[in-house]
């Protein structure tokens, strides 16, 4: 989800909720401690130089249980970040403290922001000889003589 989409969705809600991938919620008393833009330049495993920009929100929970961040306050923080830091309308990632700092993608569904698990991937599958998708085999199509048997010499 891009930053402009986050802002559009903030305008439609009265309460700010972030749902984690396991179905639990970030505590109501969370803070957004950072809104920024992260630029990353790197070379993938195929030798291609890449550049990536993302908008980053960092969520944090403290012991101030009476704290509540309202949608309009987050929108003000975002607008200030756009104005002062020239943040672009890029994809948003959210950092949140689990056992370590976790990074999530974000979606909006039924009036809530859902934090989506992210995964690593090979960006040069063609050069690394990594299949684009897993080969699916119908196990019922395998015959007894296609399988290894003890003493069959196939293993």
Image (cartoon, grey):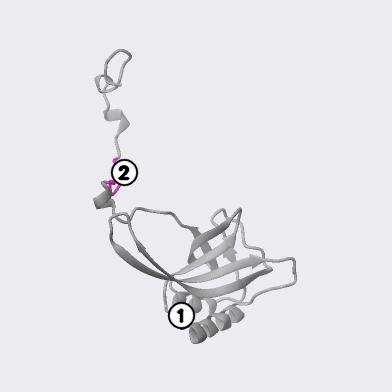
71 is within the stretch colored magenta: no
Residue 98 in percent (x, y) is at: 60, 56
- Front residue of 75/48: it is 48
Residue located at (25% from left, 19% from top):
145
- Front residue of 20/35: it is 35
Residue interval drawn in magenta:
130-135
Dot 2: what SS? loop
**What is the distance, in whole Å, between disc 2 and disc 1 at their CAs?**
38 Å
In-image side of 43 versus 89 (left or right): left
The image quarter in which residue 142 lies: top left
Report whether residue 109 is seen: no
Above or below, 8 against 154 in this view is: below
Dot 1: what SS? loop
133 is within the stretch colored magenta: yes
Q: Nearer the viewer, mark 2 or mark 1?
A: 1
Residue located at (27% from left, 48% from top):
128
- Front residue of 42/98: it is 42
Q: Tag 2: Cα neighbours inside 10 Å, few (<14), some, or many (≥20)?
A: few
Location of mark 1 (residue): 87
Outermost bottom residue:
83
Q: Mark 2 or mark 1: which comes first in sequence?
A: 1
Please name the predominant secondary structure of the magenta segment in the image: loop
Location of mark 2 (residue): 134
The image quarter in which residue 46 lies: bottom left
The image quarter in which residue 68 lies: bottom right
Residue located at (55% from left, 64% from top):
95
Residue 1 in percent (x, y) is at: 44, 69
The C terminus lies in which quarter of the figure? top left
Residue 125 in percent (x, y) is at: 28, 51
């Amino acid at each position: 989800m891009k930053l402009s989409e986050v802002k559009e969705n903030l305008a439609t809600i009265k309460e700010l909720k972030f749902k984690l991938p396991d179905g639990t919620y970030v505590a109501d008393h969370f803070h957004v401690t950072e809104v920024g833009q992260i630029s990353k330049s790197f070379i993938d495993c195929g030798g291609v130089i890449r550049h990536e920009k993302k908008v980053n929100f960092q969520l944090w929970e403290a012991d101030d249980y009476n704290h509540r961040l309202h949608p309009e306050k987050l929108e003000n923080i975002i607008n200030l970040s756009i104005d002062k830091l020239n943040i672009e309308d890029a994809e948003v990632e959210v950092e949140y403290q689990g056992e370590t700092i976790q990074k999530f993608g974000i979606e909006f569904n039924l009036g809530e922001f859902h934090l989506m698990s992210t995964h690593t991937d090979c960006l040069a599958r063609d050069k690394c000889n990594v299949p684009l998708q897993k080969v699916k085999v119908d196990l019922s199509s395998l015959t007894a003589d296609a399988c290894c048997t003890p003493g069959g010499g196939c293993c």
